[in-house]
Amino acid sequence: MAILALGVSHRHAPVELLDRLAFTEDDLAKAYRRAADDPAVEEAVIVSTCNRVEVYGSVPSYHAGFQVLKRILTETRGVAAAELSEPMYAHYELEAAEHVFTVASGLDSMVLGEPQILSQVREALRQAQAEDAAGPSLSALFHAAARTGRRVRSETSVGAAPDAFVGAGADLGAEALGGLAGRHALVVGAGQMAALAVRHLRGRGVATIRILNRSLERARALAERTGSDHGDLLTLPGALAEADLLVSATGAAGIVVPASALDGRRRPLFVLDLAVPRDVEPSAGERPNVTLVDLDGLRETLDARAAGTAGDIERAHEIVAEELHRFTLRRRAEHLAPLIAALRERGEAAIATEFERFRSDLAELAPDERAAVEALARGIVAKLLHDPIVRLKELSAPGTQDAHARALADLFGLQARGTEPDRPPA
């Protein structure tokens, strides 16, 4: 089985398209059932974040697998295939592994090293496993990706700032409002990103923070941890009237803050929408005294910030390369293991055959003498097989391992197992 990844990300797709492609938990369950029903996909993992929507598959055939994974992105999300022709990318085998390692490290995010992506990659695997969609191949891939992300975080400063998303948006808010000190902030949502927003805004000296969430209990819990006020979403209109800054970061499937809720503003309001799908109706930015920034609007600021960490970025890419090499060796060993085992079995069979042939000649040997002869025979066979096995591992680069495996199998009269799927077009 080979690894194939199809996806759409912030690099080539507008937020509007990412909104429509984003998977809710119910959507994920349906998509995994869709994948399970098709023999062209053995395993599947879906990564759906604010920056990207990607489907990873363990597939016996590139072409058939490509079509199924693409249909998962289109048919299950109600997006026309033509809309993905420009922004969609595909990665196969080691390119797919390198891509998910880079993603987990935060090197492919809108905010360099953004803190959420590593936990999102781990959560994607957990959800796939819960749906019995991820087997040994993709589980190994995603565990290796998580290890890569952890190394990048611990060995470099990439991703060291856990409030990167909020920080970039808050800087724009400070520019729009003439500073954040003494301002009144409203945070909609009570998840990890909302918590980061609250902590960051506290550090910027805002006067008050009110947290609203559909679950009042979650809003209360976050408010108690951060010394903030709280309420449920029913109080949104009144809370908006008192706010200078709104940060919205929920996981809702639809609009949480309609444009009409911002009608009649008499003083400036800066709105930072960090959610995908978007929480705030896009036309809200056209209302008087309202400045709206979503993920599309953050791109320029974030690209500029990435320029100052070249050394750490280089080291992070080196870590990705090291982990990719480690993953490649492990997969190569797994791929060749059946053939190597068969080769060693053939050696053992040859020893057994020859000992049977010379049984009468060996009958007069003392037990220790017979053991010495057997050890000598096994040692000779092991040495003869050692070099072909080592060379097979060394020569088995991507795209060539089956050629060498077949040649060795033919020479020794073995069955070549685990042949490679068809390759994508050049």
Image: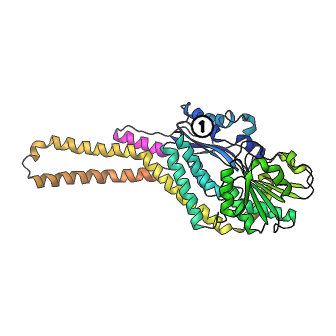
Point 60% across, 55% down: residue = 118
Residue 404 in view in this figure: yes
Side of 62 relative to 295 (left or right): left
Q: Which colour scheme is used?
A: rainbow
Point 82% across, 68% down: residue = 182
Range shown magenta: 398-426
**Image quadrant where residue 359 sits:** top left
User: Considering the numbered disc 1 on the image, is that residue within a helix, a strand or a loop?
Assistant: helix
Residue 72 position within the rendered picture, expressed as x and y whole percent measured from the top left? 64, 36
Q: What residue is disc 1 on?
A: 29
Residue 107 in view in this figure: no
Side of 146 relative to 378 (left or right): right
Residue 139 position within the rendered picture, expressed as x and y whole percent measured from the top left? 51, 47
Q: Which one is nearer the viewer's eye here, 252 or 425?
A: 252
Type of the residue with mark 1 = Ala
Point 52% across, 43% down: residue = 129
The relative height of residue 222 versus residue 94 in the rendered view (above or below) is below
**Image quadrant where residue 161 sits:** bottom right
The relative height of residue 271 versus residue 81 in the rendered view (above or below) is below
Is the C terminus in the top left, top right, bottom left or bottom right quadrant? top right
